[in-house]
Amino acid sequence: MASRPWSEWSASLSHLVLGTVSLHAAVSTAQASRGAAAGFLLQALAAATTLAPGLRTDEDCLAGAWVATVIGLPLLAFDFHWMNGDCSSANLLLGGGMVLAVAGDHLGAEGRSVAGQAVVLVVAVTILIVAVFTTNTYGMWGGVMLGAAGLLSRLEEDRLLLLPKEDLCRWALAAGSWTYHQALRAQRLQWE
């Protein structure tokens, strides 16, 4: 039996961590925040499509990542904004994500890439802004980590810090999802 190269292990491990963190966050937030739970669940399902042996095709992986980005991340931001009374931004983010999800087939690969990166950065910045004004430290870190994932994906290099760029983006997204889950929890405790 031949051993798997480090890059395959790194990719599998980053998908597994992102899926586990996202699934835990979805289960933990399901009672209090259905929108955020759905966003976390979409991230977990997108990570699972790459780990499942029968579903591992490039089209399935790309479709899962696209849906998790343009619908899942706006769902996360939706609840954060909604709970803080910023309903117009919440609706705008979610509506924009839905429009992009429908228009995804009409965009080329480069268009989907740019749109996905824009969604990640817009979600990260809006979460960061709300977290700063509400002094939610976890929200600030969550916004920074989500923004870091979006910025890392824009870099031209294939490897960063001895890891493939995509794996590093998933690690940053997993860290951002965990801290964002904690931000929602802190925000919920503040309202109670």
Image (cartoon, grey):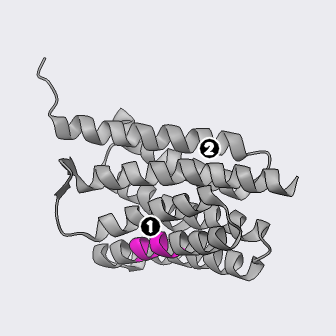
Viewer-nearest residue: 84 or 32:
84
Crowding near pointer 1: few (<14 within 10 Å), some, many (20+)? Answer: many
Report the residue at 56% width, 60% height from top: 72
Horizontal relation, residue 191 to residue 79: left or right: right
**Location of residue 97 in the rendering, given as x and y in whole percent from the top left corner:** 56, 73
Query: Mark 2 vs mark 1: which is more N-terminal?
Result: 2
Image location of residue 68, percent across then percent down:
50, 58
| Residue where numbered disc 1 is placed | 147
Query: Is residue 55 visible in the rendered structure shown here?
Result: no
- Residue 148, x across and y down, in percent: 39, 64
Vertically, is 16 above or below 3? Answer: below
> Of the residues shown, which amino acid type is indicated by label 2?
Ala
Position of 99 compared to 3: left or right?
right
Q: Main secondary structure of the magenta part?
A: helix
Which residue appears at 53% of the width and 52% of the height?
177
- Looking at the rendering, the stretch of residues picked out in magenta corresponds to 115-122
Check residue 35 for magenta coloring: no
Answer yes or no: do the residues labelled 2 and 1 have beta carbons within 8 Å? no
Mark nearest the camera among 2 and 1 is 1
30 left or right of 101? right
Q: Residue furthest right?
A: 192
Given the image, on which type of amino acid does mark 1 rest?
A: Gly
Q: Which mark is residue 25?
A: 2
Q: Does dot 2 land on a helix, a strand or a loop?
A: helix
Closer to the camera, 95 or 153? Answer: 153
User: Which residue occupies the foreground of this view, 78 or 48?
Assistant: 78
Residue depicted at x 24% and y 69%: 155
| Residue 144 in sight from this viewpoint | yes
Percent of width and height locating residue 130: 66, 72
